[in-house]
Structure formats: structure tokens, C-alpha cells
Amino acid sequence: MLEDIVHDKNFANIMKKTITDMIVLFFEKEHNFGILCQVEDVSFDPPLPQEITEAFRPVTLFFLAGYTFETARIENDMLVFEAGFGQENFGSVVYVPLLSILQIIIDETPVLINVASYQPEQEKEEETPAPSIDEEGVKKSMELFLNNPENAKFLK
């Protein structure tokens, strides 16, 4: 049952809306927050140097405060913000898909936990071939139909 829900498109849309609403509320209240997210889904522009990306764990915490918080916005189902990384404070714009946010954290306490694992790629339907028609079966069925005198009333 849980497996069906977490992979469900409607459930994912509800989670995405909840994540959006919560982040917008924090923007409005000017309240800093952290996001725990799947770093494999996050993109950086410009890309970060390899020595920085190697230090990331599969699930990484980004804390939005100061300049990072001021630049943060939601755009095209992504949380977007500017941040500095490493000792050189290498600047990059960070793009985090909303559904990749696993937790939103305030003062070290999770205030939202996202368990949706639906991915938009799941929507790409594989083309299913049209069912093949059994010509022989159709012919036999028609013969049986025509052989029954009761069915004559259907033919004109």
C-alpha cells in the first residue's frame, strides 16, 4: 500500500505543492531554513570543481541563510539559489528539483518530510502496440453468428 502511494503522481503533486507552499511561507517570513536533498538530482551553474562535488554525500544539506537565502526563489518546479562552496567560496547557482527535497529543516528540526518517489520520467509511456486481430477467430465468430437463424433479424 505505501509503495503504491509514494510512486503515485497525484501524491507527488501534493508533496510538491506542500514543499512549495512551505518554502514560500519561509520566504515571506524571512526565516532561514535548510533542505536535505538528493544531490544526484541537483545541478550547479557553473559546475563545481570535482574536489568539491566529491565531498558531497548522496543526501546533502544546504542551509539557506544570508546571501544564499536572499537569492533563493522557486522557478520551474526547482528551488534555485546562489551559494559559495569550498575554501575558495566558489560561486554557483544551485538548481534543486522540489521533489528531490527530502526534508525541510528549521533549527535542526525537520518540519517537512517528503517520501514521494515519483519521477516525471515515469510519465513517458512506452508505446504499446495495438492488439493484433486474430483474423481466423473473427472469421469463425462471423460464421457461427451467420449460422444461427435467430441472428437473421440483425442483418439487412
Image (tube, grey):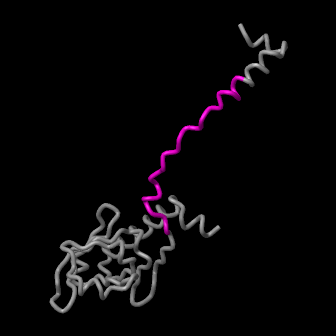
**For this rendering, which residue is in front, 26 or 59?**
59
Residue at left 71%, top 7%?
Answer: 156
Quarter where residue 59 is shown = bottom left
Question: In which quadrant will I find the N terminus?
Answer: bottom right
Q: Which residues are magenta?
A: 117-139
Residue at left 79%, top 21%?
Answer: 144
In the image, is 85 to the left or to the right of 9? left
| Residue 72 in view, yes or no | no
Q: Which secondary structure dominates the residues rendered in magenta? A: loop
Quarter where residue 89 is shown = bottom left
Q: Residue furthest front?
A: 136
In the image, is 127 to the left or to the right of 149? left
In the image, is 98 to the left or to the right of 112? left
Q: Position of residue 42 (x, y in %)?
A: 32, 73
Q: Position of residue 152 (x, y in %)?
A: 79, 11
Q: Position of residue 66 (x, y in %)?
A: 22, 84
Relative to 14, residue 149 above or below: above
Q: Is residue 126 magenta?
A: yes
Relative to 6, residue 51 above or below: below
Relative to 2, residue 135 above or below: above
